[in-house]
Image (cartoon, helix red, strand yellow):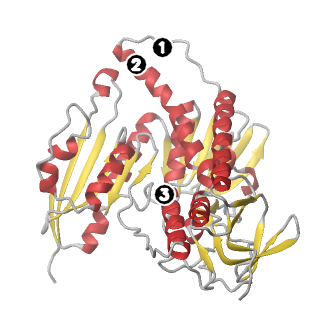
């Protein structure tokens, strides 16, 4: 029997890799986890966590403005970007340290090194130049922001990675993209005081989300003062003495201090040696895996964003845990990627679970759709022109709720709870018989009684 240095070697100490390593070590496996940057991965270091901290920071401008309607005087308020970044950095350092300590406490070895796959059971630690062997290799390297190399001047832009480390808050910002990262950073920069423009090549922001959410978020962001230009893209970027000059495909010229590209992320597999080892990759570099996260090479698995299945931190964690249970715990688990609650921390934020209206119409023959749009109680005194939106998509034959979509304050918090009810197969009648909690915005979810649209698929 071949003796390996480790039972499991994990490449990447992000959320999925760390969870897999901890659980496998708990089953008695000899585990090593290699990380070339910092433990914590994209989410902790340069993604969800620092982004949400910056979102919180950007909300205070609204809070100070809204407070006047409630009798507060908020003159003389100022904001200091370096203080925010320094405090954010301290929290990220704490969390990164916790990831490392938790791994080691579970009995796994953390190797701070870049690791490259050299075969089905071997990995080279690059800085040291040594090779180790493992019965199982798990790739959990996540993804990285994509930049279009064909755009002249692309070397002058930043991505979400660099946005967390800017020395000062730019006065004028162009955000390129229309996905959740783009709209979130547009809200952050605008809320902190930057003149912000969002440029997106598609016809409407947030492709893949429910069309009503897309339309109403566009409207609310515009009301706040963010300029949104759809159907256009960057043609060139030129560095000038005063900043950057951006020329678009439609002939627009924008003078800005920073251009943030958020046009998508690609699986981080370049240079990892996976092709040499025989691992099949998709055209965008994702590791192709089966339902149990196994690649085309039986001893090599992959979880998280590097597989490009559902690119969300909780999904990576669940996949990592399921992998360890299956391979080292003798408890086969298949992760269900359906009905995953999702939040976009735009301003106002989005919370959603289940099917969009377009998806439901493609899969079902009868739908009852409920919608409501209203002014939240907070803004009856604040005077802010912001409206909340809620939508339920119901199977017209079984009364089961197929999708729930919210735009407004605490939408993400509501979507987490809705994820449970939708997953359990709750019907509209279940919603209707649930007592409302008053006064809250969430009570609208159980008080919508009038069908906004009855849709029936045409026969033939």
Location of the C terminus (image quadrant) = bottom left
Cβ atoms at labels 1 and 2 below 8 Å apart: yes
Mark 2 surroundings within 10 Å by alpha-carbon count, few (fewer than 14), some (14 through 19), many (20 or more) = some
What residue is shown with label 2? 67
Tell me which label, 1 or 3, sits earlier in the chain: 1
| Image coordinates for residue 349, horizontal then vertical, percent | 41, 43
What separation in Å lies between label 2 and label 3 (alpha carbons)?
35 Å
Residue 74: mark: 1
Tell me which label, 2 or 3, sits earlier in the chain: 2
Q: Residue at x 52, y 57 (%)?
A: 313
Tell me which label, 1 or 2, sits earlier in the chain: 2
Mark 1 surroundings within 10 Å by alpha-carbon count, few (fewer than 14), some (14 through 19), many (20 or more) = few
Depicted 223 relative to depicted 60: above or below:
below
Cβ atoms at labels 2 and 3 below 8 Å apart: no
What residue is shown with label 3? 314
Number of numbered discs visible in the structure rendering: 3
| Image coordinates for residue 116, horizontal then vertical, percent | 76, 72
Task: Examine the rendering and report whether any part of residue 142 can be seen.
Answer: yes
In this view, the residue in front, 340 or 335, is 335
Q: Residue furthest bottom?
A: 1
- Classify residue 317 as left or right of residue 83: left
Which of labels 2 and 3 is toward the front?
Answer: 3
Depicted 304 relative to depicted 410: above or below:
below
| Image coordinates for residue 458, horizontal then vertical, percent | 15, 76
- Classify residue 113 as left or right of residue 233: right
| Image coordinates for residue 109, horizontal then vertical, percent | 72, 60
Dividing the picture into quadrants, the one containing residue 42 is bottom right
In this view, the residue in front, 414 or 10, is 10
């Amino acid at each position: 029997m071949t003796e390996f240095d480790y039972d499991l070697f994990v490449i990447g100490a992000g959320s999925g890799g760390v969870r897999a390593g901890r659980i496998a070590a708990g089953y008695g496996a000899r585990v090593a986890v290699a990380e070339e940057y910092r433990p914590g991965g994209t989410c902790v270091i340069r993604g969800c966590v620092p982004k949400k901290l910056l979102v919180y920071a950007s909300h205070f401008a609204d809070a100070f403005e809204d407070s006047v309607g409630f009798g507060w005087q908020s003159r003389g308020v100022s904001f200091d970007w370096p203080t925010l970044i320094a405090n954010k950095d301290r929290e990220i350092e704490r969390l990164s340290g916790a990831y490392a300590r938790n791994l080691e406490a579970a009995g796994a070895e953390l190797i701070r090194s870049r690791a490259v796959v050299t075969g089905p059971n071997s990995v080279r630690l690059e800085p040291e130049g040594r090779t180790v062997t493992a019965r199982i290799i798990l790739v959990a390297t996540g993804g990285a922001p994509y930049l279009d190399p064909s755009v002249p001047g692309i070397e002058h832009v930043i991505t979400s990675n660099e946005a967390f480390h800017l020395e000062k808050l730019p006065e004028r910002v162009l955000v390129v993209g229309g996905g959740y990262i783009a709209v979130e950073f547009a809200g952050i920069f605008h809320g902190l005081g930057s003149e912000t423009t969002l440029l997106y090549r598609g016809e409407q922001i947030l492709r893949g989300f429910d069309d009503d959410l897309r339309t109403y978020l566009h409207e609310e962001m515009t009301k706040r003062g963010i300029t949104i230009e759809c159907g256009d893209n960057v043609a060139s970027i030129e560095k000038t003495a005063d900043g950057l000059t951006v020329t678009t495909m439609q002939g627009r010229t924008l003078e800005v201090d920073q251009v943030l590209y958020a046009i998508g992320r690609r699986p981080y597999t370049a240079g990892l040696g996976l092709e040499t080892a025989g691992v099949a990759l998709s055209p965008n570099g994702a590791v192709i895996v089966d339902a149990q996260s196994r690649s085309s090479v039986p001893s090599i698995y992959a979880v998280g964003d590097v597989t490009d299945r559902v690119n969300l931190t909780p999904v990576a964690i669940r996949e990592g845990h399921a992998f360890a249970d299956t391979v080292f715990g003798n408890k086969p688990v298949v992760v269900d990627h359906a009905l995953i609650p999702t939040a976009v921390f735009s301003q106002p934020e989005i919370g959603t679970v289940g099917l969009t209206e377009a998806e439901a119409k493609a899969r079902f023959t009868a739908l009852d759709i409920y919608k409501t749009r209203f002014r939240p109680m907070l803004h009856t005194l604040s005077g802010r022109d912001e409206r909340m939106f809620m939508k339920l998509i119901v199977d017209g034959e079984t009364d089961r709720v197929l999708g729930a979509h919210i735009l407004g304050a605490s939408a993400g918090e509501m979507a987490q709870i809705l994820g449970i009810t939708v997953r359990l197969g709750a019907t509209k009648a279940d919603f209707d018989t649930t007592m409302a909690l008053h006064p809250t915005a969430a009570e609208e979810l159980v008080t919508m009684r009038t069908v906004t649209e009855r849709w029936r698929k045409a026969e033939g």
